[in-house]
């Protein structure tokens, strides 16, 4: 298949990252459908419309990672509504029936899932670590259930992930990183995915459900890494129970800890 257009890649990234801002999503869809002779690279308007619709179908609805790691239903609904709004908005000369039908079918499925509180509260977020690969996390869109706060992606953790992923904090890193209160694992998984100088990341939390989810996220990230040939070497991951209130370090790996992180 032809390499994805940057505008299509952008919308796919927004979906993978769990972005649910309706304005941002509609703007992203508008940029996809925008056509000018100057930026057409030799394509006619009709050829451009056909290309982007086929790429949208493949990138948003048939993407292997989307099927394996589906976003939170609320995110999926907003992405689909933004896309359907663009398809219905008169920006295209002709709308492909296959794409439109797939969007409607997926939206109906999301609405059915909305009646199930457990299904509605859970989904995946995929973050990219530049020049290294991606991390996959199963998250919740609110409090409650066994995860409590440990299943939510918090802004400080995402901010710290960005600093580590960009290399801005490399001078403070060492071989073994211990993360306190890992939650979804966004910081520790990002450090492990980036690799050297980090060779071992120990993710810790105290709730059994959160620990199980951390193991799930670590396995999903490792599996994703093994499937992408361009992924850099990933640091080893360990998941251990550690209660801040009554710390017991006997269950941690024997290797000396070089850096402790928390958000």
Image: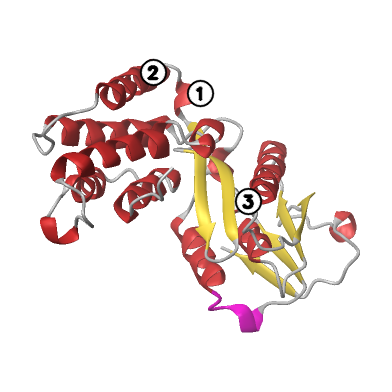
Separation (CA) of disc 3 from disc 1: 31 Å
Q: Depth check: 56 or 3 in front?
A: 3
Image x and y of residue 76, in percent:
37, 33
Q: Residue 38 occupies which quadrant of the picture?
A: bottom left
Q: Residue 45 occupies which quadrant of the picture?
A: top left
Task: Give, as a single range, the part of the protein colored magenta.
Answer: 167-172
Image x and y of residue 257, in percent:
80, 71
**Residue 214 among those drawn in magenta:** no
Residue 150 appearing in the image: yes
Residue at the disc numbered 2: 109
Residue 241 appearing in the image: no
Q: Does residue 144 lie above or below 20 as drawn?
A: above
Q: Secondary structure at mark 2?
A: helix
Nearest to viewer (mark 3 / mark 1): 3
Image x and y of residue 217, in percent:
65, 44
Q: Residues within 10 Å of mark 1 (few under 14, many from 20)?
A: few
Residue at the disc numbered 3: 228
Q: Depth check: 209 or 166 in front?
A: 166
Residue at the disc numbered 1: 118
Asked if the residues shown at circle 1 and circle 2 are in contact, with their CB atoms under 8 angstroms apart, the answer is no
Marks 3 and 1, the one that precedes in the sequence: 1
Nearest to viewer (mark 1 / mark 2): 2
Disc sitting over residue 256 in the figure: none
Q: Residue furthest front?
A: 42
Marks 2 and 3, the one that precedes in the sequence: 2
Tell me which residue sits at (38%, 15%) in the image.
Answer: 112
């Amino acid at each position: 298949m032809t390499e994805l257009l940057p505008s299509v890649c952008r919308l796919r990234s927004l979906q993978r990252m769990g972005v649910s801002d309706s304005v941002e999503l509609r703007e992203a869809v508008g940029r996809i459908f925008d056509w000018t002779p100057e930026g057409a690279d030799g394509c006619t308007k009709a050829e451009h419309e056909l290309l982007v619709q086929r790429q949208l179908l493949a990138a948003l609805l048939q993407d292997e990672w989307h099927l394996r790691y589906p976003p939170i239903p609320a995110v999926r609904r907003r992405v689909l509504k933004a896309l359907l709004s663009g398809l219905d908005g008169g920006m295209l000369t002709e709308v492909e029936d296959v794409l439109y039908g797939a969007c409607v079918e997926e939206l109906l499925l999301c609405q059915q899932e909305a009646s199930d509180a457990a299904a509605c509260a859970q989904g995946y977020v995929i973050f990219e670590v530049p020049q290294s690969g991606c991390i996959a996390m199963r998250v919740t869109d609110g409090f409650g259930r066994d995860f409590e706060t440990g299943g939510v992606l918090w802004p400080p953790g995402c901010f710290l992930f960005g600093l580590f992923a960009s290399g801005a904090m490399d001078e403070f890193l060492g071989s073994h990183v211990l993360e306190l209160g890992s939650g979804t694992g966004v910081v520790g998984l990002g450090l492990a995915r980036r690799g050297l100088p980090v060779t071992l990341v120990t993710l810790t939390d105290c709730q059994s459900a959160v620990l199980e989810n951390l193991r799930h996220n670590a396995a999903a990230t490792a599996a994703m890494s093994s499937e992408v040939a361009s992924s850099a070497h990933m640091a080893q991951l360990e998941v251990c129970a550690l209660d801040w209130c009554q710390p017991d370090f006997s269950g941690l790996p024997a290797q000396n800890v070089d850096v402790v992180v928390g958000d």
